[in-house]
Image (spheres, rainbow, N blue to C red):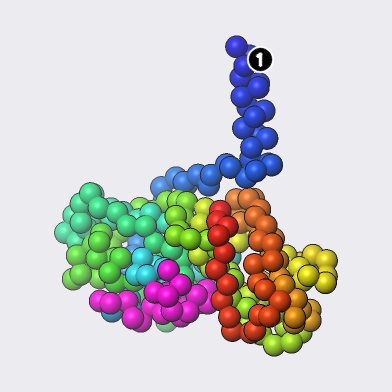
């Protein structure tokens, strides 16, 4: 039996490190609070500190939220997914019982130090807070409540289609937005390679935007992306050599 278990564990480890089949696992449950913004159609949630732009065209829709400082991690949490339930035991008046919603982190909820943490300064450190798109919030809470206690867990992101790369910038500066990331959702590191170069490490510029300071015009571009759970995927020649700044390139590769 011990020998069988050893073989099984060895096989699973081999899978994790060679073909990246170990799925991102949900976290435990944590207490927080949630408010809403952006209007009934979530039109006010477009853009945001992660840089995803039009959340409808980029596939995020209305199931999104802005994270407080304690959760946003200076943009490193962009793209993460959270399952949120209203804490009915703590607030039966304004919570909807037995419902949940899964959101993607697309924005930052800034602190308001002019207001106390328990009266308007909801996103002040060290509070864990979700300022959710209104349609998402109304799946767990009653509108008039305004703010509700919640329980949340980080969960795997399920996205349609592959990871998308949008190349902005100019000449010796490539600013690449990486969106529609499944699995862990958030990105730990990125490298870029032109068809005439070796691999070059990119740095986070802001949100989900990563930068390179190389002249790559006229070259096909490849990317090596590692998510925050340590899974790495290779996106080879996903940007053709005739690319132009401002273009988006969907792929068939997903985490």
Task: Name the residue carrying label 1.
Answer: 3
- Marker count (numbered): 1
Residue depicted at x 25% and y 59%: 140
Q: State the image coordinates of residue 205 (x, y, percent, origin top left).
A: 65, 76
Instruction: Please state which of residues 243 and 59 is positioned toward the viewer in this rendering.
Output: 243
Relative to 54, 247 lies left or right: right
Residue 53 seen in this snapshot: yes
Q: Residue furthest left?
A: 93
Residue depicted at x 51% and y 57%: 182
- Residue span colored magenta: 40-59
Residue 58 part of the magenta-drawn span: yes
Q: Secondary structure at mark 1?
A: helix
Residue 210 seen in this snapshot: no
Instruction: Please state which of residues 70 and 159 is positioned toward the viewer in this rendering.
Output: 159
Instruction: Please state which of residues 8 and 89 is positioned toward the viewer in this rendering.
Output: 8
Q: State the image coordinates of residue 34 (x, y, percent, origin top left).
A: 34, 65
From this view, report whether residue 90 is shown above or below residue 131: above
Which quadrant would residue 145 be assigned to in this image? bottom left
Residue 237 part of the magenta-drawn span: no
Which quadrant would residue 246 be assigned to in this image? bottom right
């Amino acid at each position: 039996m011990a020998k069988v278990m050893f073989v099984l564990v060895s096989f699973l480890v081999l899978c994790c490190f060679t073909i990246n089949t170990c799925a991102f696992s949900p976290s435990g449950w944590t207490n927080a609070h949630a408010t809403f913004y952006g209007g009934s159609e979530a039109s006010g949630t477009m853009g945001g500190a992660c840089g995803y732009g039009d959340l409808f065209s980029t596939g995020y829709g209305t199931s999104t939220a802005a994270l407080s400082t304690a959760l946003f991690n200076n943009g490193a949490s962009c793209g993460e997914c959270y399952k949120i339930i209203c804490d009915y035991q703590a607030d039966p008046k304004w919570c909807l019982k037995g419902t949940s919603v899964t959101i993607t982190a697309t924005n930052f909820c800034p602190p308001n130090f002019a207001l106390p943490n328990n009266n308007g300064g909801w996103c002040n450190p060290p509070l864990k807070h979700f300022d959710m798109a209104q349609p998402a919030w109304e799946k767990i809470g009653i509108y008039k409540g305004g703010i509700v206690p919640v329980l949340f867990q980080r969960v795997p992101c399920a996205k349609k289609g592959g990871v998308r790369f949008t190349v902005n910038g100019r000449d010796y500066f490539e600013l690449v937005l990486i969106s529609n990331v499944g699995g862990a959702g958030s990105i730990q590191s990125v490298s870029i390679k032109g068809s005439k170069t070796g691999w070059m490490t990119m740095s986070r510029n802001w949100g989900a935007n990563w930068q390179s300071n190389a002249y790559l015009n006229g070259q096909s571009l490849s990317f090596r992306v590692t998510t925050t759970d340590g899974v790495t995927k290779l996106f080879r020649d996903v940007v053709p050599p005739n690319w132009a700044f401002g273009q988006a390139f969907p792929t068939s590769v997903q985490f």
